[in-house]
Image (cartoon, grey):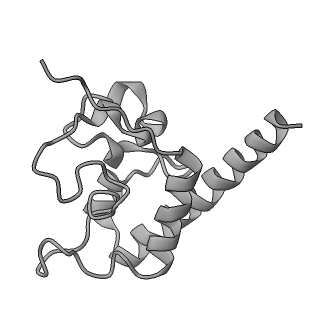
Amino acid sequence: MAKPQKDDRDLLEMLQFELRFLEDGGYGQSPHAARRASLIFEDSLTCMNFNSQDRTPYSACLLMKFVPPGRATEQIPCRHIPLNSDGETLASLYESATQLEIEEALGNWLRATIHRLERERAAANS
């Protein structure tokens, strides 16, 4: 039986990479299908299953730390991470927002989350 994979990347570094990817226009066009909008996280190298033939269970993904427990069993859990105080998620934004609004919400969430993790690390190391 195959051993379940674990995402052993550093969470802070992964989020910083994702923010750079976003700010550099990485979601401008999907590498998978030029006819559809890019899917946040899923069309990024931060996704464990990006361009993978062997699907890794989402339970092994670092982003699961941000998925509410009641949404952990969703088909694509990272779409249910609350991105702001209104509880908007990628799933809800995909239904009503423009790509620009989605990217703005993601950028705000990434910057706030990175800042919080940096503060937590600094406190733990002092």
- Residue 12 at x, y percent in the picture: 59, 50
Left or right of 54 in this view: 5: right
Residue 95: image quadrant is: bottom left
Tally of numbered tags: 0
Left or right of 28 in this view: 30: left
The residue that appears at 23% across and 23% down in the rendered structure is 3
Left or right of 36 in this view: 40: right
Q: Residue furthest top?
A: 1
Residue 63 visible in the snapshot: yes
- Residue 40 at x, y percent in the picture: 33, 62
**Closer to the camera, 114 or 79?**
114
- Residue 44 at x, y percent in the picture: 33, 63
- Residue 56 at x, y percent in the picture: 21, 38
Q: Is residue 96 above or below residue 5?
A: below
Q: Is residue 108 above or below residue 68?
A: below
The residue that appears at 32% across and 53% down in the rendered structure is 47
Residue 70: image quadrant is: top left
The residue that appears at 24% across and 43% down in the rendered structure is 76
Q: Is residue 77 above or below residue 100?
A: above
Considering the image in quadrants, where does the N terminus appear? top left
Q: Is residue 63 above or below residue 107?
A: above
Considering the image in quadrants, where does the C terminus appear? top right
Residue 85 visible in the snapshot: no
